[in-house]
Image (cartoon, rainbow, N blue to C red):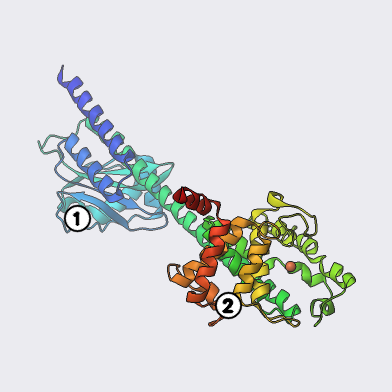
Amino acid sequence: MDPTSQKLVHSFGALADLGQEIANTREFNEMVRTSLHLLLGTLAIRRGAVAHCLPGEEQVACLAVWGLGEEFESRLTINATERQAFLTSGLSDLSKDTGNPHFTEFFSRHREELTSQEIELVIPMVVRGELTGLVLLGGKASGEPFTEDDLEVIRAMVRHIGVGIHTHRLFDQVEQRAEENRRLYDDLRAIYRDTVRAFAAAIDIKDKYTQGHSERVGKYSEIIAREMGWPDEEVEGIAIAGYLHDIGKLVVERDIINAPYKIDAKQSSELNRHPAAGFEILSPIHHPYADIPLMARYHHERIDGRGYPDGLSGEEIPLGARIVSLADSFDAMTTDRPYKTRRIFCVVIEDFRRNTGKQFDCQVVLALCRALLKEMNGTGTDRRMTKMLGKNYLEAERDTPLINQLISELDPNQQAAAATSSV
Ligand SMILES: [Fe+2]
């Protein structure tokens, strides 16, 4: 192979290596350093640096240096008109007078620094019509001058490096915007959650006997859904549904909601409007979580089809609504009302036993029981239910066997396991 062809193959190989280096997205500074080494190595140049120019900034900062001393820091500055001159120049040889007054100004300002570092070439990195940075190069180790072919190779390699830096900046910008969007989204979610809690408080204020009911239903629903293995997003959604499940009560007369006695049939049918009214209120709102209006509409449906407003049964009722329904009933049973005191825990368990499969969904009851057990035996992450129920309501020694017994009656897997072990 003749020397020219050999040189071409060598340059082509160096360009391929450089392309690969830049495409490899590992650490940015490392990429720039290796690219500079490849460029210097290809033409046996002793020293050089890669510096970048940030939009709107005059300072030219070094990203990588080689052979200029560890301490080398670029003191180069570039103003707007000089930038413009570099955009059209392609390559600037310090030994030649380009005649461009802006170059003259740039080089006369920096001649001392550049010549003291034995820099011979200043090559602009131009990508998409913008000056990304400058590559500073010393002379060849052989002392020979750069040939036109050398300069072609240098231009091609510098273009590669420029694209690498430009791409990195784009990634950075995209990441920054994504971060900003994440923050905005988090803010919006926080605002949404606060608004929902304010609504829940407004609902509960209307009903003076069930203070904090909506908030507790939200929390119980969240705990049950988490116990059932729902993903975080959906758990957050069902908590919101719990907070808002009784929002329809806002359109029911205050006297009926606050009646300190058992209400009559007419008042009862007025009160029973609230799930459908809640659906009407919530439907036009764009919620970040699906099905919140449906959970409000169906929270008084029953598994056996004897609920309201639509008399749905079994799996026709969305699972979220079955969860809110149990959370709602559990809170109603475990808090004092004007016409009745709350039930003791064994009576609640008895209610679950009697009504699972009729009023309540079996899987949902099991999840509530398991979450209660975890709190009582200390394997849960917190004791939120215990706190909501009050300090002396549950007693681990007395109530754990009750829950275990109900779980073994309701859980088909446990029954199957028991049957297998008894054979
Ligand atoms: Fe309700």
Nearer to me, 321 or 45: 321
Residue placed at 22% from the left, 53% from the top? 111
Image position, residue 91 (x, y; %): 30, 40
Kindly indicate the quadrant of the structure image that contains residue 250.
Answer: bottom right
Residue 142 horizontal side relative to residue 51, left or right: left
The kind of residue on which mark 2 rests is Leu
**Residue 171 in view:** yes
Residue placed at 27% from the left, 54% from the top? 62
* First-in-chain label (1 vs 2): 1
Distance from mark 2 CB to nearest ligand 1 atom below 8 Å: no
Q: Against 194, is 6 above or below?
A: above
**Residue 198 in view:** no
Q: Which mark is on residue 112?
A: 1
The kind of residue on which mark 1 rests is Glu
Sort mark 2 into few (<14), some (14-19) or many (20+) by Cα contacts within 10 Å.
some
Kindly indicate the quadrant of the structure image that contains residue 243.
Answer: bottom right
Residue placed at 20% from the left, 51% from the top? 114
Which numbered disc, 1 or 2, marks the residue closer to the eye? 2
Residue placed at 39% from the left, 50% from the top? 169
Nearer to me, 402 or 48: 402
Q: Against 77, is 266 above or below?
A: below
- C-alpha separation, residue under disc 1 versus residue under disc 2: 80 Å
Distance from mark 1 CB to nearest ligand 1 atom below 8 Å: no
Image position, residue 410 (x, y; %): 58, 57
Give the residue pinned by disc 2: 389
Nearer to me, 334 or 7: 334
